[in-house]
C-alpha cells in the first residue's frame, strides 16, 4: 500500500506539473510575460513561476496566507489508473482551476503562488505570511507548489540557488518575499542576510519602535541566529572606559557603541524583545583566557515596569576550553525568580536595610546583595591582587581573580528560533 501511495503521489506531481506548465503558457499568451515559449528554457531564472517545496501547510492556512479556491470541477482522473481509454470531462475543468489560479495570481501583485493538494485536488492561492518561515527542507508530499519569481517586495531579489527572495540589500526587510521589517535576528538569518556579528535596527509591530541590537548570523539561510543584548569587551573591562553605575533611566534606555560590539540593549527594549517572542532562552556567558562558561536559562522572561525576571528551567552549565576542574554554580538560582532590577536611584531589591545596586556599584537583579554574576560590574585589577568583592564581576564556583590578566568578554545572549 505504501509503494502504491508513492506511485500515486509521483503520478499526481507529474500531472500537476504538466497542468501548471500549460497554465504558464496560457498566462504568456494572455498577458505577454514571455516573448515566446522558446525563451522559457533559456531564461529559467526569469520565469514567472517555479516549482518549490512547501512546508508548514497547516500554519499557512491558519494564518490566512494559503487560501483555498472554490473548485469549479471535480478531481482530475488519470486514465491509466482506472483503466479507461478516455479522460473524464472533469479533467479539463479541474485543470482550469489551476490555470485560473495562476492567471489571477499573475494579475495580482500581492499573490505569490498557487498550489494543489494531490489527494483531493483542492487549489490554493498563496499570499505573503506575517510569520517568517525557515527554508523548507522536507516537502509535504501531498502538495505541489509553484511560486512567482517576481513576487519579491521592497527591493528583494530572487535567489535561484535557494529558490527564494534574498532580502539582503533591503532596509532590513525579511520573510519569504521581504514583506516586512525584521523583529528578530533569526528572521534576518532566514532571509538571506550574511553571517557574522553586526548591528541591526529591528522593528516591533506593537509600537513601531526601532530597537538597535547586535546579531550573530550563521549565514546559512536557516534557523541558526542569536541576539546579543549585552556585551562588554575585554579591552573595555581593563580600561573601564564606561561607568556602569548608571541611573534607572540609563539602564532602561540602553546604549550601543556602534564602532565596537559593546553595549546594552536597555530594559525597555529587552522587555519588548521578550514580549514579542516570549519565552526565549537566555545565555549568560563569561570568557576567561581561552575558555568560556555559559549558563542557559530556558523560558526567560521579564515583567513590565519592574523587569522582574523569571524562567522555566536552567540547562546544564557548559564549560569550554582548558580551564581546570572547576564547576560553575547557578547565577539565577530558584530564589532569584521574581527578583526586580535595581539601580542606585531605584531600590527594588528585597534587602530591607541596604541598596544593593548602590553597594555593588552597578545595576542588576538583586535579592539580598550577595548575588554573583553581576556582569555590569568591573573586572578585578590585572596588576593588584584583590580580595573577593561584591563590587567586581564574579561567577559562582569560579575564582575569576586567578584569570584577571586574561579576563575576556561578558555577555547576555538570546537564543532565537522561528518555531
Image (tube, rainbow, N blue to C red):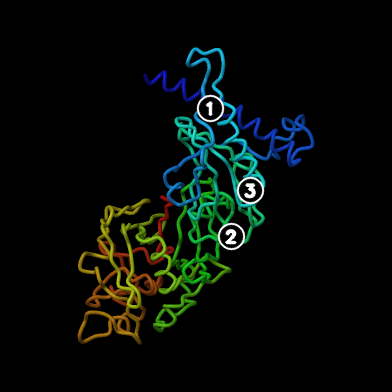
* Residue 144 image offset from top left, x and y in percent: 52, 34
Q: Is disc 2 surrounded by few (<14), some (14 to 19) or many (20+) residues within 10 Å?
A: many
Sooner in the amino-acid sequence: mark 3 or mark 2: 3
Front-lying residue, 44 or 64:
64
Q: Is disc 1 surrounded by few (<14), some (14 to 19) or many (20+) residues within 10 Å?
A: many
Disc on res. 261: none
Secondary element at tag 1: helix
* Residue 237 image offset from top left, x and y in percent: 44, 71
Q: Is disc 3 surrounded by few (<14), some (14 to 19) or many (20+) residues within 10 Å?
A: many
Quadrant of the frame with the N terminus: top left
- Nearer to us of marks 3 and 2 is 3
User: Disc 1 designates what residue?
Assistant: 13
Q: Quadrant of residue 280?
A: bottom left
Front-lying residue, 88 or 112:
88
Label 2 with label 1: CB-CB less than 8 Å: no
Secondary element at tag 3: loop
Sooner in the amino-acid sequence: mark 2 or mark 1: 1
* Residue 179 image offset from top left, x and y in percent: 58, 56
Disc on res. 151: 3
Front-lying residue, 376 or 14:
14
Position above or below: 286 against 120: below
User: Alpha-carbon distance for marks 3 and 2?
Assistant: 17 Å
* Residue 283 image offset from top left, x and y in percent: 36, 59
Query: In the image, what residue occupies the spot 43% across and 47% down?
Result: 59
Secondary element at tag 2: loop
**In the displayed structure image, the side of residue 240 where residue 111 appears, left or right:** right
User: Alpha-carbon distance for marks 3 and 1?
Assistant: 23 Å
Sooner in the amino-acid sequence: mark 3 or mark 1: 1
**In the displayed structure image, the side of residue 58 where residue 341 appears, left or right:** left
User: Disc 2 designates what residue?
Assistant: 172
Amino acid at each position: 500500500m505504501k509503494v502504491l501511495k508513492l506511485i500515486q503521489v509521483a503520478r499526481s506531481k507529474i500531472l500537476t506539473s504538466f497542468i501548471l506548465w500549460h497554465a504558464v503558457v496560457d498566462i504568456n499568451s494572455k498577458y505577454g510575460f514571455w516573448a515566446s515559449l522558446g525563451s522559457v528554457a533559456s531564461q529559467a531564472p526569469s520565469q514567472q513561476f517555479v516549482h518549490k517545496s512547501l512546508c508548514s501547510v497547516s500554519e499557512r492556512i491558519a494564518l490566512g496566507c494559503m487560501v483555498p479556491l472554490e473548485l469549479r470541477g471535480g478531481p482530475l482522473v488519470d486514465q491509466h489508473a482506472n483503466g479507461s481509454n478516455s479522460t473524464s470531462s472533469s479533467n479539463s475543468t479541474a485543470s482550469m482551476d489551476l490555470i485560473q489560479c495562476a492567471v489571477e495570481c499573475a494579475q495580482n501583485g500581492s499573490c505569490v503562488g498557487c498550489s494543489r493538494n494531490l489527494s483531493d485536488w483542492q487549489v490554493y492561492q498563496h499570499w505573503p505570511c506575517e510569520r517568517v518561515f525557515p527554508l523548507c527542507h522536507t516537502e509535504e508530499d501531498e502538495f505541489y507548489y509553484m511560486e512567482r519569481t517576481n513576487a519579491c517586495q521592497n527591493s528583494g531579489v530572487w535567489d535561484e540557488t535557494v529558490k527564494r527572495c534574498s532580502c539582503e540589500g533591503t532596509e532590513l526587510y525579511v520573510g519569504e518575499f521581504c514583506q516586512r521589517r525584521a523583529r528578530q535576528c533569526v528572521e534576518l538569518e532566514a532571509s538571506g542576510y550574511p553571517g557574522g556579528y553586526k548591528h541591526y535596527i529591528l522593528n516591533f509591530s506593537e509600537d513601531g519602535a526601532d530597537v538597535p541590537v547586535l546579531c550573530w548570523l550563521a549565514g546559512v539561510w536557516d534557523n541558526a541566529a542569536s541576539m546579543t543584548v549585552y556585551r562588554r569587551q575585554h579591552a573595555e573591562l581593563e580600561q573601564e572606559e564606561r561607568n556602569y553605575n548608571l541611573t534607572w533611566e540609563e539602564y532602561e534606555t540602553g546604549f550601543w557603541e556602534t564602532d565596537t560590539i559593546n553595549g546594552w540593549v536597555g530594559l525597555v527594549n529587552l522587555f519588548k524583545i521578550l514580549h514579542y517572542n516570549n519565552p526565549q532562552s537566555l545565555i549568560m556567558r563569561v570568557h576567561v583566557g581561552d575558555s568560556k562558561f555559559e549558563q542557559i536559562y530556558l523560558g526567560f522572561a521579564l515583567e513590565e515596569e519592574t523587569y522582574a525576571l523569571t524562567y522555566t528551567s536552567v540547562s546544564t552549565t557548559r564549560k569550554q576550553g582548558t580551564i581546570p576542574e572547576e564547576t560553575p554554580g547557578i547565577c539565577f538560582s530558584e530564589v532569584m525568580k521574581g527578583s526586580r532590577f535595581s539601580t542606585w536611584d531605584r531600590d527594588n531589591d528585597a534587602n530591607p536595610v541596604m541598596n544593593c545596586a548602590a553597594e555593588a556599584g552597578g545595576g542588576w537583579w538583586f535579592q539580598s546583595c550577595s548575588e554573583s554574576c553581576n556582569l555590569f560590574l568591573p573586572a578585578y585589577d590585572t596588576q593588584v591582587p584583590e580580595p573577593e568583592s561584591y563590587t567586581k564581576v564574579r561567577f559562582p564556583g569560579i575564582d575569576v581573580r586567578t584569570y584577571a590578566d586574561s579576563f575576556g568578554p561578558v555577555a547576555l545572549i538570546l537564543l532565537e528560533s522561528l518555531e
